[in-house]
Image (tube, helix red, strand yellow):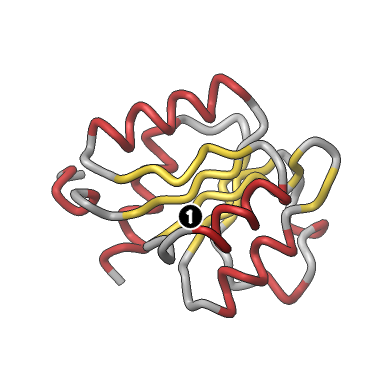
Amino acid sequence: MPHSIFQGRRILVAEDEYFLADELRRELQDAGAEMLGPVASVRSGLQILEARTKPDAASLDVNLGGECVYPLADVLIARSVPFVFTTGYDQGVIPDAYAHVLRLEKPVEPETVLAAIGTLLKA
């Protein structure tokens, strides 16, 4: 995927798995994205959304330190920000309100997440 799609785009990453968060940060920055995060909690994600410009897209781990990411997802939906879920949970655990959100099953490669975000940015 051409990295030009990420150039200057603000991407929020909410991920509590350190190595995946760090790899996503590195790959997105290398592709030219402006990183918002990564954050490891819903509270930190909400603080970024309150303090910063609206992201262009996001990647959200469904479970951040034992807390469901849905409050953060709700704010993104209200602001029309597209996002993907990364999770080890199967689709049946995700509430119906988020059935339209692409779910990437962990373990997931950073390149897969970048490809999914790139697709969102093109839409």
* Left/right of residue 91 with respect to residue 66 in the rendered view: left
* Left/right of residue 100 with respect to residue 64 in the rendered view: left
Q: Is residue 1 above or below residue 69?
A: above
- The image shows residue 62 at horizontal and vertical percentages of 71, 49
Residue that extends furthest to the top in the rendered view of this protein = 19
Q: In this view, does 122 lie above or below 5?
A: below
* Left/right of residue 67 with respect to residue 101 in the rendered view: right
Residue that extends furthest to the front in the rendered view of this protein = 51
Q: Is residue 60 above or below residue 73?
A: above
User: Who's the residue at 33% across and 37% down the image?
Assistant: 28
Q: In this view, does 103 lie above or below 21?
A: below
Which quarter of the rendered picture does the N terminus lie within? Answer: top left
Name the element at disc 1. strand
User: Who's the residue at 19% across and 49% down the image?
Assistant: 7
- The image shows residue 58 at horizontal and vertical percentages of 48, 55
Residue under label 1, please give it. Answer: 58
The quadrant holding residue 97 is: bottom right
User: Who's the residue at 36% across and 27% down the image?
Assistant: 26
The quadrant holding residue 113 is: top left
Residue that extends furthest to the right in the rendered view of this protein = 66
